Image: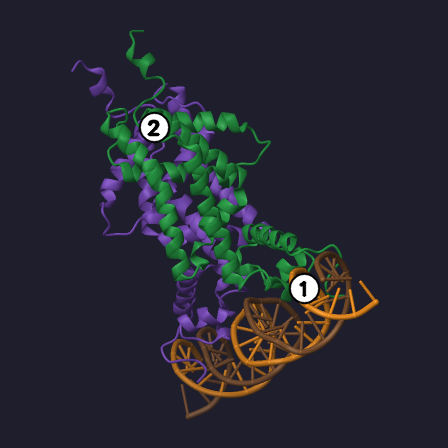
Chain colours: A green, B purple, C orange, D brown
Amino acid sequence: MARRSGSSGEKTAIALHDAAVRLFARHGFAAVSMRQIAAEIGVQVGALYLYTADKQALLNDILSGHMEHLLLTAGETLPVSGSPAARLEAFVRFHIRYHVLRPEKVFISYMELRNLTEDNFAAIEVLRRRYEDLLEDILKAGKAGRDFHITDTRLTTLAMIAMLTGISTWYKSGGRMTQEEIEAHYLEMVNNMVGRPLAAELLASPS
Amino acid sequence: MARRSGSSGEKTAIALHDAAVRLFARHGFAAVSMRQIAAEIGVQVGALYLYTADKQALLNDILSGHMEHLLLTAGETLPVSGSPAARLEAFVRFHIRYHVLRPEKVFISYMELRNLTEDNFAAIEVLRRRYEDLLEDILKAGKAGRDFHITDTRLTTLAMIAMLTGISTWYKSGGRMTQEEIEAHYLEMVNNMVGRPLAAELLASPS
DNA sequence: TTGCCAACTGTACGGGTGTTCAGTTACGTT
DNA sequence: AACGTAACTGAACACCCGTACAGTTGGCAA
């Protein structure tokens, strides 16, 4: 054999990317060999190097591609105007949906950061910080307008993102709750965190 | 050489444990070789096998030791009676302190779970669930007594733990905030989450 | 139908992997 | 002072690692 019938570079490149994501997510970057990846897509090791410079580039492409796509999609989806409360709701729903749809890439993206070279890591950090700032800007706006009651916007940002991203450690489609229910519950908790409980009117009104 | 002067099995066993924790935290289980660990404690590879059956046992001992110690310490520290609010505060403070004091073990403990064998993993899961239940029991009690306004105690438990554990991804002693300040801020957010904002009286009282 | 090139194989390179074990040395006990 | 044993070395085992590259084959254009 050599070239295989029906083969095309495009298809193999995608298969390589997908196989790497799947295997890195399951076993971890360091624990997966180039030979395992090759076997997964039905090819010999050498062929992989037509599509990636080396193993490190493979990881970096996955992570930076993920972060860039996340930022791009967030930019397209999230409203830049409207009330802080509405913008916060949009962010929470977007974050949950995006992360629940891509559990493997999300998992790799904060599990394998330390396996990046220093340069690659620094670049990812910039993107991650930019994403966090999308939320922090909403919180700042809400605090400035007294819609939200927050002591420290940066800390609240980190706490919320950790809380929301945590979903991906236990979420499985077809679980106890639908995605819509999960969104509703987390939205409630997030609203509570910024001091505007949905039940506020009920509690404040004479009973 | 052979046996080295001043050597003792006890000391080497501890040095092995510590070096493994340090290196696993920094580079990941799969990326660290037995030879690197041996070099770190100034010994030849073969000597390690006097203190651990194999590499897997080394990881499992670290993780299960960590979880058992966490549960034990929690049991000694946390009050079993008192108001749900007081118990919740105790839990939050305990969790933050414990995790901030042991960043490496905490990091390994949810980073390297997938490198455990199936059996070892299952055992750790039981312990982790038991720890989560410590918090969920408090939330259930608070909900039952109408101190807390929670829709789903299990989801709130997971959200809180993810939020609190997230601290260890950015915390560095000597940072912007003291540990006490961090505790106070997270406590505020947690209280908000269960629907009892500290500012409630202020907001409700005539201004 | 020939020829070109993208796609891929097969093999090799130097080095690292976890683990085992016969041999060696320091320490504590008698 | 002699001995037993705890602590460790050094070398070896069989195998896996990432990467490179000359050679081979299928698809497509001329």
Q: Residue at x 36, y 23 (%)?
A: B148
Using the numbered discs, state the Cα–Cα distance from disc 1 to disc 2 in whole angstroms: 52 Å
Q: Nearer the viewer, residue A119 or B182?
A: A119
* Labels 1 and 2: the sequence-earlier one: 1
Q: Residue at x 32, y 6 (%)?
A: A207
Q: Residues within 10 Å of mark 2 (few under 14, many from 20)?
A: few
| Quarter residue B196 falls in | top left
**Residue B182 percent coordinates (x, y):** 26, 41
* Above or below, comparing residue A22 to residue A193 in the picture: below
User: Of helix, strand and loop, which one carries label 2?
Assistant: loop
- Which one is in front in this view, the residue at disc 1 or the one at disc 2? 2
Counting every numbered tag in the picture gives 2
Tell me the tag on residue A5.
none
Q: Residues within 10 Å of mark 1 (few under 14, many from 20)?
A: some
Residue B77 appears in view? no
The residue labelled by disc 1 is A44
- The answer as to whether the residues below labels 1 and 2 share one chain is yes
| Quarter residue B183 falls in | top left
